[in-house]
Amino acid sequence: MAPHFQPAFLQRQQASFQFLFDSGEPFHLEVEGTSFEFSPGEARQPTITLYIKDHATCWNLLDGSMDGMNAFMDGSYRADGNIVLSQLILYLFRRAEPAFGYEIQD
């Protein structure tokens, strides 16, 4: 995940994400500047708590292979806390989409 880490999406220097699951052990993500660390267990003071169906759903959301809106609508993903961060985290580790450049000539 490190090669795809894009901390600029958070628009802040520090954030603590708590992940709680319907099935599976909790873990948390600490982001500090341009570094991050996943750790088992619960964070002391999470910025946001994310409630997710299971670990597979979590990793699929983080790597962009699952759509966050669909997961939210089917009840697999919800959040308490800074709701904006609940959306920004979905882009934190997402692979960059290919971009095309066009030049208009008269």
Image (tube, rainbow, N blue to C red):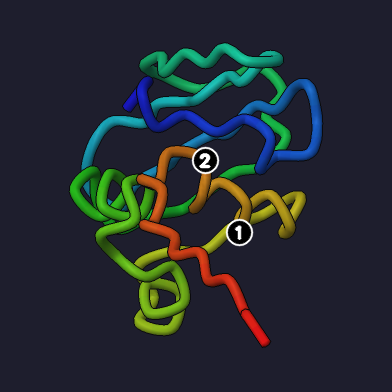
To which quarter of the image does residue 13 belong? Answer: top right
Q: In the image, what residue type sits under mark 2?
A: Leu
Which quarter shows the N terminus? top left
Q: Which residue is mark 2?
A: 92
Location of residue 28 with respect to 24 vertically, above or below: above
Location of residue 17 with respect to 55 vertically, above or below: above
Viewer-nearest residue: 25 or 104: 104
Q: Which residue is mark 1?
A: 87
Q: Position of residue 85 (x, y in %)?
A: 68, 49
Side of 75 where 86 appears, left or right: right
Identify the secondary structure beneath mark 2: loop
Side of 104 where 81 appears, left or right: right
Q: In the image, what residue type sits under mark 1?
A: Gln
Q: CA distance from mark 1 to mark 2?
A: 9 Å
Viewer-nearest residue: 106 or 44: 106
**Neighbour tally class for label 2: few under 14, some 14-19, many 20 plus, Cα within 10 Å:** some
Q: Position of residue 6 (x, y in %)?
A: 55, 33
